[in-house]
Structure formats: structure tokens, C-alpha cells
Image (tube, rainbow, N blue to C red):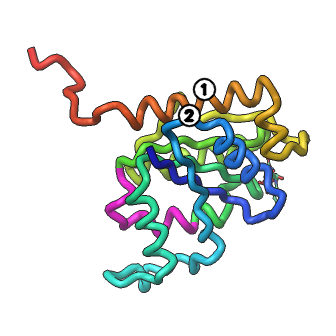
Amino acid sequence: MNILAICGSLRARSTNLAVLEAAKLLAPADMQITIFGGLAALPHFNPDLDTEDPPETVRSLREAIGRADGLIICSPEYARGVAGVTKNALDWLVSSFEFPAKPIAVINASQRSTHADAALRLTLETMSARLIKEASITMPLLGRGLDAAGIAADEELSTQLRQALAQVQHVVAAPTDAPRHSPI
Ligand SMILES: Cc1cc2nc3c(=O)[nH]c(=O)nc-3n(C[C@H](O)[C@H](O)[C@H](O)COP(=O)(O)O)c2cc1C
């Protein structure tokens, strides 16, 4: 299964990026995680440009989401809000047909960042995403300064991340057209 990962921090030594790179190291054998590399190049969202022929970078984001079976978003909190990079990308996806119902795990890399986590979940819910609650976790990485290898080597953190990835795998692999209730 193909999972597209979106990192809301553009910092080279980003903790959020380290989480996603650790996820690549810890992913189950049948899960390929690709970190979307084009976020910094997205233009600022402008409804006037959100036409049948959107900017190329927007098209490539939407196509990458279309190819993905699920998404992981890992994004920092800035000034008690969602990082602008992440919100900008989501704004470009509001009108896309690829995004609604896509299973998504939100991984919060800081135990202090409660506001952005809540706001991001609200935005995703508003956009009809399928939030995988069991896979949407907060990892206590604030102040740890760990890179991907350090996260993967830590027993507690790697177990937490592995369990979240297993939940993503479970939800993505499950048939979606099965009846939720017994027809009788
Ligand atoms: C301008 C700025 C504002 C921030 N505001 C908050 C905040 O309101 N709440 C919080 O918990 N952390 C805040 N932080 C800390 C970042 O969320 C934290 O450093 C995070 O690890 C950054 O992610 P990164 O390591 O992936 O770049 C802020 C950091 C910066 C640079």
C-alpha cells in the first residue's frame, strides 16, 4: 500500500520530518511511505487560480494524493495554530476530488502542541477526510532532539509509531463498501 506523508515543517532538521523518516524505517513490509517533497513550492492559496487548470505544483500534490491509499500528516504548531505550510496545502485540496474520504493519520510530534492538533483535526473533518483516530497520536518528542534513527531506536517511541502504522495498515486494507450494519 502507498502512503503519502506530508510534513508541515520546512526546517532541514525538523522533528516532524524525523518522525516521518522514522515511520519509513518502521513501516510494515507492504507499506511504502513517500514523503511529499513539493510543499515549499506550492503557491499561496488563491481561489482565482483554483480552476480546471491549476498551478503545476498543485496538480502534482493532488495527483500524489490520488495515487496514495492513505496519508500521514506530521506538522508543527506555530503561535497556537496549524503551520501555514500545512494549511496552505489543505486549502488547495478543499476543491479536489482526490482528498475526501482519504484515510489520514495525524501525528503530533510535541506534547505541548495541543492547539494545532485540535485545529488540524477540525479542518480535516470539515474537508471530509477519514481521520484514523487510533493512528493519530501525540509523540512526546519536544526537547528530545532526536533524528529518525534515534526515534526508531527508542523502544517506547518506536512501539508507539509502529502501532500507529499498524492502525493505518488495518484501516487502509479494510474494505470500505462493506455494510456497516446488519441488513436485517
Ligand atoms: C515561530 C514559532 C512559533 C511557535 N509556536 C509554538 C506554539 O504556539 N506552541 C508550541 O507548542 N510550539 C510552538 N513552537 C515550537 C514548534 O512547534 C516546535 O519547535 C516544533 O518542533 C517545530 O517543528 P519542527 O522541529 O518539525 O520544525 C513554535 C516555533 C516557532 C519557530
What's the amino acid at mark 2? Pro
Q: Nearer the viewer, mark 1 or mark 2?
A: 2
The image shows residue 168, relative to residue 81, as above or below, that is: above
The magenta segment: 88-100
Q: Quadrant of the N terminus?
A: top left
Rendering coords of residue 93 (x, y %): 44, 64
Answer yes or no: do the residues labelled 1 and 2 have beta carbons within 8 Å? Answer: no
- In the picture as drawn, the residue positioned furthest to the top comes out as 184
* Circle 1 Cα neighbour tier, 10 Å, few/some/many (<14 / 14–19 / ≥20): some
What's the amino acid at mark 1? Gln
Q: Which residue is mark 2?
A: 28
Question: Along the line of sight, which residue is nearer the eye, 76 or 39?
Answer: 39
Q: Secondary structure at mark 1?
A: helix
Query: Quick check: which quadrant has ligand 1?
Result: bottom right
Q: Residue at x 11, y 19 (%)?
A: 183
Q: Residue at x 63, y 30 (%)?
A: 162
Q: Which residue is mark 1?
A: 163
